[in-house]
């Protein structure tokens, strides 16, 4: 029996607003424990939360990016549970009426576009952190993270493979970065993921029982967890058992998931509307304004690069992953006049190399789209050689000059005039009878020698490829 | 535990919470926590909490209507005179019933204040003045006028 996997993902992303969601505390990572706190986020009695409007704006932007319907009226709710990192013993979140709902996300996997439904996006506050130390036989509570704003993005169970899951997560991450609403550093916990997996026979329409898996700490851990769960659930079914609906904990080191709590012990969060906060009302004008302010999104760019411009997906990904590189690429394509693949090559090799080695951005050099196009253009026309092109590029990194000026200054132009080169070739052939004979007798190295002599005679200015072709042609006459 | 009591011996986190709360909270607090948890719990929300919220709207609307005709509504603060010390706290519902006048204004979201208005067998009687939403000024003016008419609120009675 063949089974297909059905996967839904819940992503929590910390928003990079200046302040926390319900108080004025600074929203920053890595400070000394319990230093970014105040009575509000520590849940002291008598305090009241006030909503940070930027959080709503950022969430709406993400909603637009994922094609969601934005709910102009929504509310916040209390979600109750006890844990030492949750000082109020409830988390302010959104229950039945989230800020954004019913969207979709197109991901590109192996050149194919797949559409994953987005159920909802809602806003909520983060909890603190528990720290463990050998010197202390318990846990230490750091409340710095309490009140950091989160958006939770819930997908429909439309994902059908672990590779698609990874692509989905990477796309969500790149959109968050493009919108500049989250710094998405999984190692700092600013983006987290819970995985829901169920299985069903291929062709079945009903869903199987799903398990939720927590403690998935990286995108590749998500892949491993999904594969494990898929195999585990099939094993249970094949042995005649039933999959128990439960929450499990993924242990990446051991490569297994273990039950956390069963349905009987499932949490009753006792949601009710947060009475200390006003209804969120966003006017349609603001919603439209936020939509208009959206840049072209990375997944849309990726599709355009791969499907319309014919750029290989791997290179396209590396351009799209960098806001700077994709901006430069787009500007070049707009100016036109050269093949997109050439622009891609220059950006993914020479420009990337420079950025990686120096840690600088292109904006700090004098290279811009106009100059890059100009450079690529003269190379494509054969006016300078590839090698000369590299020299021009290196020079532009340091000096504020146009390619034309540099070419002139350094005498880099090459001769691609066929008749001139032919004339030169004939002269060299006449002067090197022995080599010509050698070549005609099968010594192919002689060709290289003759071409070399032509290059020498042209003082290195001849277009080498063209030279070689001309010599070969003349020799066969 | 940041505020107040923390139990001294416990086996795990759940135990710590359970013991601290059981040992530290008084009866009335426990009563209210249990009532609150119950009305919000899965399966009971609609029957209790949701219904109560709808009723709240109804009560607030009725007051709104009344305030179309009047500026201030007067009620007793409590449906009896002052409690004797050592009053029997065994019947919580009876105790809740004495809150009927004051809880109502909380539910309706209205401002109110209480002033002394005489005695019955030596025990003071409280008079509650209820105003329109955000109209504390009228309330204070009314109470002040009343205070002047009765010549001040007099000496505090002996307990």
Image (cartoon, coloured by chain):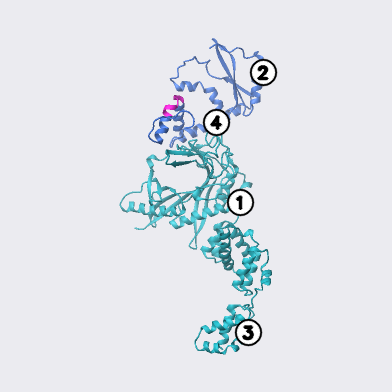
Chain colours: A cyan, B blue
Q: What residue did someone put label 1 on?
A: A291
How far apart are the two marked residues, 4 and 1, measured between alpha carbons?
38 Å
SS label for mark 2: helix
Q: In the rendered image of this protein, does residue A438 appear above or below residue A292?
A: below
Chain letter for mark 2, please. B
Q: Name the one closer to the observer, B9 or A9.
A: B9
2 and 3 marks on the same chain: no
Measured from the top left, where is residue A135 in percent x and y? 43, 40
Q: Residues within 10 Å of mark 1 (few under 14, many from 20)?
A: some
Secondary structure predominantly adopted by residues drawn in magenta: helix
The residue wearing badge 4 is A46
Which residue carries the number 2 mark?
B145
Q: Quarter of the image containing the C terminus of chain A? A: bottom right
Element under disc 1: helix
Q: Where is residue A457 drawn, in percent x and y?
A: 62, 82
Does the segment drawn in magenta span residue B22?
yes
Residue A337 visible in image = no
Q: The disc numbered 1 marks a residue on which chain?
A: A
Say left or right for A268 vs A405.
Answer: left
For residue A424, the mark is 3
The answer for how far apart the CA atoms under marks 2 and 3 are is: 117 Å
């Amino acid at each position: 029996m063949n089974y297909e996997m059905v996967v839904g993902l819940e992503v929590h992303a910390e928003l990079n607003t200046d302040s926390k969601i319900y108080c004025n505390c600074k929203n920053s990572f890595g400070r000394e424990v319990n230093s970014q706190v105040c009575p509000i986020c520590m849940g002291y009695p008598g305090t009241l939360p006030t909503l940070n409007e930027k959080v709503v704006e950022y969430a709406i932007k993400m909603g637009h990016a994922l094609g969601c319907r934005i709910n102009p009226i929504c509310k916040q709710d209390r979600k109750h549970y006890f844990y030492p990192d949750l000082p109020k013993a409830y988390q302010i979140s959104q229950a039945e009426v989230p800020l954004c709902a019913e969207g979709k996300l197109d991901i590109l996997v192996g050149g194919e576009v797949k559409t994953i439904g987005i159920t909802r996006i809602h806003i909520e506050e983060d909890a603190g952190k528990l720290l463990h130390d050998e010197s202390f036989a318990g846990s230490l509570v750091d409340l710095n993270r309490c009140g950091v704003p989160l958006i939770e993005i819930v997908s429909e169970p439309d994902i059908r493979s672990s590779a698609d899951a990874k692509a989905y997560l990477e796309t969500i991450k790149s959109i968050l970065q493009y919108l500049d609403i989250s710094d998405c550093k999984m190692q700092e916990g600013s983006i987290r993921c819970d995985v829901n997996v169920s299985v069903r026979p291929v062709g079945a329409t009903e869903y199987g029982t799903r398990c939720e898996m927590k403690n998935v700490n990286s995108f590749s851990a998500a892949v491993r967890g999904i594969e494990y769960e898929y195999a585990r659930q099939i094993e249970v079914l094949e042995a005649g058992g039933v999959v128990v609906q439960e929450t499990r904990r993924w242990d990446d080191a051991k490569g297994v998931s273990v039950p956390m709590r069963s349905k009987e012990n499932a949490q009753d969060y006792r949601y009710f509307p947060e009475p200390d906060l006003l209804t969120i009302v966003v006017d349609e004008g603001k919603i439209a304004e936020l939509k208009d302010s959206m840049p072209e999104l990375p997944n849309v760019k990726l599709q355009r690069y791969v499907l319309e411009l014919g750029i290989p997906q791997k290179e396209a990904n590396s351009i799209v992953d960098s806001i700077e590189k994709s901006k430069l690429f787009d500007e070049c394509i707009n100016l036109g006049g050269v093949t997109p693949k050439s622009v891609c090559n220059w950006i993914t090799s020479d420009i990337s190399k420079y950025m990686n080695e120096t840690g600088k951005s292109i904006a700090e050099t004098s290279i811009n789209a106009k100059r890059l196009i100009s450079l690529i253009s003269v190379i494509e026309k054969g006016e300078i050689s590839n090698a000369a092109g590299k020299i021009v590029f290196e020079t532009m990194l340091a000096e504020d000059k146009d390619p034309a000026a540099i070419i002139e200054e350094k005498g880099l132009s090459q001769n691609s005039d066929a008749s001139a080169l032919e004339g030169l070739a004939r002269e060299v052939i006449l002067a090197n009878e022995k080599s010509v004979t050698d070549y005609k007798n099968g010594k192919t190295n002689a060709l290289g020698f003759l071409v070399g002599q032509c290059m020498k005679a042209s003082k290195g200015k001849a277009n080498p490829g063209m030279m070689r072709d001309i010599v070969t042609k003349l020799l066969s006459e | 535990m940041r505020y107040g009591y923390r139990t001294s011996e416990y086996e795990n986190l759940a135990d710590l919470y359970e013991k601290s709360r059981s040992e530290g909270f008084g009866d009335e607090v426990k009563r209210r926590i249990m009532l609150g948890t119950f009305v919000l719990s899965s399966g009971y929300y609609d029957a209790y909490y949701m219904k109560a919220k709808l009723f709240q709207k109804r009560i607030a609307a009725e007051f709104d209507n009344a305030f179309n005709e009047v500026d201030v509504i007067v009620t007793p603060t409590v449906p009896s005179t002052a409690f004797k010390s050592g009053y029997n706290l065994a019947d919580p519902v009876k105790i809740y019933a004495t809150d009927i006048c004051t809880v109502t204004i909380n539910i309706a979201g209205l401002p109110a204040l209480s002033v002394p208005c005489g005695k019955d067998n030596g025990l003071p009687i409280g008079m509650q003045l209820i105003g329109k939403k955000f109209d504390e000024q009228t309330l204070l003016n009314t109470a002040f006028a009343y205070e002047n008419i009765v010549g001040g609120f007099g000496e505090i009675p002996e307990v």
